[in-house]
Image (cartoon, rainbow, N blue to C red):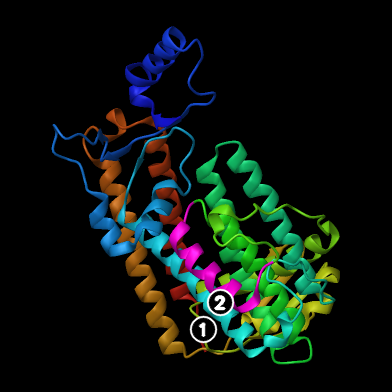
Amino acid sequence: LETGYDILFFWVARMIMLGLEHMGEIPFGTVYLHGLVKAGTVKMSKSLGNVVSPVEFIEDYGADALRYALVHGIAMGADSQLSQNKLDHARNFANKLWNISRFVLKQVDEHPEAFKGHAADERPQPKSESARWILSRTDAAVAEATRLIDGYLFGEYLVALEAFIWGELADIYVELAKPSLRGADAVEAVRTLVYVLDRVLRLLHPSMPFITETIAVQLWKRAGKSDDARSLVVSPWPKAGERDLALEERFGAFIDVVRAIRNVRQEGGVDPSGRVKVSLAGETAAVRDLLAQIAELTHSEVTLGKGEGTATVVRAIEIRLVAERDEAEERARLERDLDEARQMLQRSRDLLAKPGFADKAPTDVVAKEKAKLQEREGRVRLLEAELKKPRA
């Protein structure tokens, strides 16, 4: 049985007692008590007139995105609020899944030979390290999703799946596979993409049934499948295979370097289309053979060596980035960032100075706001110092 915790005694306990009295048995073995979706800090209630119809959100975002937003990241039994940010994030994730799928389906259409005698759900045996890495990470995702669903940790289940789909499949493997799709390893790459997508659709189906079913029908129509199930809802749940932990560790370092370079570029205001020079030093053994892939994923020229400037360090690897910048444009960017940082700082100061806030607000909320204040003060000082530096 699944129900809200607020009617535990009004409904659940009543049914158990009636079941024992009239049938001699408990009517259900497990009761899952979910939290409540609140309007602000108040329970939604018809009598209060603060109930929001889900139909309004479904028309704007779709049923799958609404379901995802309601569950994603929510702790078991915890109350929640449905915010615009949550709905936007859920819609963006659905769009990301749709775009990945369109890309994979396009590759299947361009390489029909890949599925002559080979089904979408048949695990490939690729030679490339990147393909073997994503298969190992897929097995990790299957194991984790299964563990979390079996433990009724539905909010964590979606967080884990999103991290894999968006952070590893979309951001890393799809980009690494593109050169292979244009070369001699195209069949291997297509089979790997299709197999991983097949696993993803099965894992995500309980939360996003409509979009996953739509994609699965198109995928199986092109690539086939090994069983007779015509729908995801009756298809076998994936089973995790044996992982290559050594390869995962090696690629973990590679991914951390890629993300660090992307972050440094973004924080430095580097034009996304502009190429930069990156130097790597320190313990680079794990990524020495992957410099070309790092360059491809970060739009950079990557070399080994100390380089100049301040280093960002990940896994004992020193990352230094040099980008050619227009000084006037750079100063204007810093001034915009400083103005925004000062506004955010003033908001924190105003909130903490508000009469009664420090005394009446929960202790953890006050502590978080004080931490924000310190962080924002630090950012303002950093930007002010950056603007004072002499420039060529």
Given the image, on which type of amino acid does mark 2 rest? Answer: Arg
The mark that comes first in sequence, 2 or 1, is 2
Crowding at dot 2, Cα within 10 Å, few <14 / some 14-19 / many 20+, comes out as: many
Indicate the position of residue 334 as horizontal and vertical percent values: 41, 75
Q: Does 156 appear in magenta?
A: no
Instruction: Identify the disc placed on residue 272.
Output: 1
Indicate the position of residue 159 as horizontal and vertical percent values: 54, 52
Q: CA distance from mark 2 to mark 1?
A: 8 Å
In the figure, residue 164 lies in which quadrant? Answer: bottom right
Task: Please report the bounds of the magenta region as a residue range.
Answer: 207-225
- For the residue pair 364 and 228, the one nearer the viewer reads as 228
Residue shown at 54% from the left, 54% from the top? 233
Above or below for 332 versus 83: below
Above or below for 273 versus 160: below
- For the residue pair 284 and 222, the one nearer the viewer reads as 222
Q: Which residue is mark 2?
A: 265
Closer to the observer: label 2 or label 1? 1
